[in-house]
Each structure stands twice: as C-alpha cells, then as structure tokens.
Image (spheres, rainbow, N blue to C red):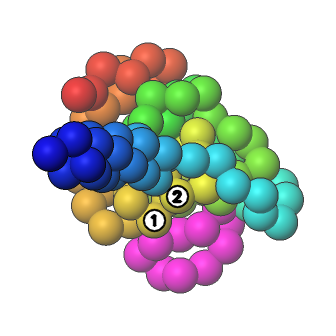
C-alpha cells in the first residue's frame, strides 16, 4: 500500500523537477560575441547587439554571450541557451512579452 503511494509521489516529483529545470536552463556553449546575431529569415549572421535587456521567453536578464535572433528588424537577446530555439518556433507569441523599450518582462 505504502509502496504504491511513494512510487506515485516520487514519480510526480521527478516529472515536476524535470519540467522546471528543462523549461529554461543555462548550458555551456561556445562563446559568441554580442555583436553577432542569427537572422531567422535568411539564416545568416549579422553584426548587431540585442535591443532588449530581458529575455522574451523566461524574463531573465539577457546573457550577452548567448545567441541572438533577428525578427522583423529587431535583434533579440536571451537569458538561457534554449530560448533562441523556442523563440524561432513562434516569435509572435514571445515578442509581446517585453515592454516597449525591452527592459521589462510583461508576459505571462
């Protein structure tokens, strides 16, 4: 009786922890200059700095060593290594998470 209960509790905790840490984790990657940005529309590198101060995905402060993405003429910086890929999948869903000047995370 207790073993089933513990199994379900531990399984639930494991999935919760896995979900939380996989949502936005910082990982080691090859350093990239802040001036280099990946342009999603053309697949090319550009020489521009991110305009935003906080990540449109997770709300963390932008890490200048991470990849940036250009969308509709703006270069977006991110707080975690996995965020640029999430942004590329649905940029319109995330651009509204930032204040007009890119200094505050206002999304949910």
- Image-based side of 93 in relation to 13, left or right: left
Please tell me whether residue 83 is drawn above or below residue 29 in the rendered image.
above
Residue of label 1: 85
- For label 1, the SS is helix
Q: Position of residue 26 (x, y in %)?
A: 64, 47
Q: Position of residue 60 (x, y in %)?
A: 54, 29
- Residue at the spot x=57%, y=47% of the render? 25
- Residue at the spot x=74%, y=42% of the render? 64
Q: How many marks?
A: 2
- Residue at the spot x=60%, y=27% of the render? 61
Magenta residue check for 105: no
Q: Which mark is residue 82?
A: 2
- Between 21 and 73, the residue placed more toward the observer is 21
Q: Nearer the viewer, mark 1 or mark 2?
A: 2
- For label 2, the SS is loop
Q: State the quadrant of the N terminus.
A: top left
Estimate how packed mark 1 is, as few (under 14), some (14 to 19) or many (20 or more) residues with alpha carbons within 10 Å. Answer: few
Mark 1 and mark 2: span between their CA atoms?
A: 6 Å
Magenta residue check for 40: yes
Q: State the quadrant of the C terminus.
A: top left
Q: Quadrant of residue 46?
A: bottom right
- Image-based side of 85 in relation to 46, left or right: left
Please tell me whether residue 80 is drawn above or below residue 55 in the rendered image.
below
Q: Quadrant of residue 33?
A: bottom right
Q: Which mark is residue 62?
A: none
- Residue at the spot x=34%, y=45% of the render? 10
| Circles 1, 2 touching at the beta carbon (< 8 Å) | yes
Magenta segment: 37-48
Query: In this view, which residue lies farthest toward the front?
Result: 1
């Amino acid at each position: 009786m207790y073993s089933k209960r513990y199994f379900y509790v531990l399984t639930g905790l494991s999935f919760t922890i896995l979900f939380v840490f996989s949502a936005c984790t910082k990982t080691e990657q090859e350093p990239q200059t802040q001036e280099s940005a990946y342009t999603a529309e053309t697949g090319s590198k550009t020489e521009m700095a991110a305009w935003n101060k906080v990540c449109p995905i997770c709300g963390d402060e932008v890490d200048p060593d991470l990849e940036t993405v250009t969308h509709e003429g703006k270069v977006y910086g991110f707080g975690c290594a996995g965020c640029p890929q999430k942004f590329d999948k649905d940029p319109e869903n995330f651009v509204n998470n930032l204040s007009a000047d890119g200094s505050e995370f206002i999304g949910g």
